[in-house]
Amino acid sequence: MRVMVREGLFTDPGTDTDTDTEPALLGSCCTNCGNFLFPRVDACTYCATEDPDPVELSGTGTLWAWTAVTAPPPGYDGEVPFGVGVVELPEGVRVIARLTESDPAALAAGQPVALRIVTLHRDDEGNDVVTYAFAPAHPS
Amino acid sequence: MTAVAITGVGMHPFGRFDGLSTTDMGVVAVRAALREAGVGKGGFQAAFCGTAYGGVATGHKVLSRLGMTGMPIVDVEAGCASGSAALMLAAAAIRAGQYDTVVVFGTEKMPKGIIRSSFFEPWQEEVGLASTPAFFGLRAQRLCQTSGITKDHLARVVVKNRRHGAANPDAMYQKETTVEEVLASRVVCEPLHLFMMCSPNEGAAALVLRRADLASSSSAAPVTLAAAVLRSHIPGSVLSESTPLSGLAHDDAPAPTTLSATAAYEEAGLGPSDLHVVECQDTDAARELGSCEELGLCDPGGSAALLDSGATELGGRLPVNPSGGLLSKGEPLGASALGQVVELVRQLRGECGPRQVEGARVALSHTVGRGANAGVVILTR
């Protein structure tokens, strides 16, 4: 079985390679100020307007900041090192995410990246726990 | 408005002290501050205690050991700025005429090893995003991109603060280091190496605050508390100390530190050019440079040039972290902000020996951390 680390953060097309469905982060768009938010919220972070519209955010963006974590943080059971970065999406929102690239020297500011669903670890019940991450996008 | 003075200060050194409890260290600091201020049982009407990991009734346990209870004792948690929050509340109560004399202290014994913060959701921990060093690394990398800071600059911040700390008997590290040694330490999160990051540790600090018109009768030379401000964040920056998971694709929102500093300068009727000495948040080397920019000690993007000029060294135009900063002292969350204030009171009194900033009469302290919480304190003499 494949389980999300937490429901409601992203969509997962799973391992079905017959479909063109791409994963997406689940965000909100404020009905008043138009700002995009991630994860989904009850009221807009910026103007406090309630019940923003649920949206799927773009799966591609550009890299704005990045580093790598070299020692396991509290409560983390996966491999180290792993990349962490900030990705700017076309909606005008920057999101914090894991990166599939764990060597900071292999990354550059403004580089195109794409959303991927990656396996974190196997839980006690034998499920593969998956989460969202951005990977360097290769020109198609 | 009633002016507030600091009439006594006390410290328990910052470091690791096996066998001593949070209460033990708080007792040492509070007792020293009360003695300096000439205040005994019945001599203060309220107490505020900053702590993040101290647990239930930390302040009560300290004052119970000293036989001084009955007054309101308020424990305050505001992350790295817990002491700033306690100080702000105490100063406001005196200004409002509620009390004449208040004790403010912070005491902390941080867990050893990698510290778990209850701030993060379980899924953030599982994903590996509950990594404080990663956020420090990302902020440091951005500052390198926007302010022309190199790893050499970062290493030189450490060398400067450790040189200052070598003259501070209350610091955890009292040994100087070199650029080569800093850059040879292992990379924790690029661009930050181990020696560029402060150590979470243990310690306590305490102050006695008094209505300024009554302070002249105290036993120690009073210092005026010209401003004590705490602010949280305005959303927008994805790398704000509020530690959000998203932000906007522009940097228009002022940093929590800037919000707090602007209010503190206004409250004190002073500006950055009036300062003689600064103690600022240096949880990592880049944080000190960012703090200098956000406090207005230089223009945005100007922190590398400020460091290069030598202004922030002892003997320079505006020494920053003459105590050695958190890079030398370590960071006991509840005590660190008040530890800065203790240092600055001693600087303004001219008591700091080899690390004395000559002729210092106006001082600023700054802490910022998760929440966001940003505290700025201005002292004058």
Image: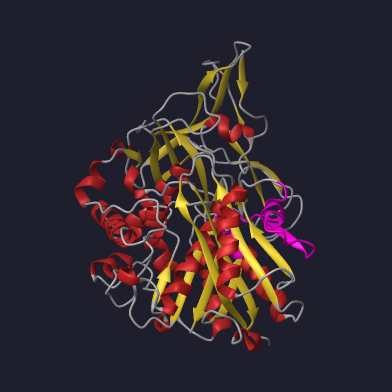
Residue B93 pos. (x, y %): 72, 74
Image quarter in which the N terminus of chain B is found: bottom right
Rendering quarter of residue B343? bottom left
Residue drawn 63% across the image and 33% down it = B122
Closest to the observer, A15 or A8: A8
Closest to the observer, B88 or B56: B56
Could you tell whether B176 is left or right of A126 in the image? left
Rendering quarter of residue A69? top left
Q: Which residues are magenta?
A: B56-84
Rendering quarter of residue B38? bottom right
Residue drawn 55% across the image and 76% down it = B264
Closest to the observer, B240 or B61: B61
Regarding residue B9, the answer to whether it shows in the image is yes
Residue B113 pos. (x, y %): 48, 35
Residue A61 pos. (x, y %): 45, 43
* Up/down of B176 relative to B314, above or below: above
Residue B303 pos. (x, y %): 33, 66
Closest to the observer, B185 or A5: B185
Regarding residue B252, the answer to whether it shows in the image is no
Please identify the residue farthest to the right as the structure is shown.
B70
Residue drawn 71% across the image and 79% down it = B100
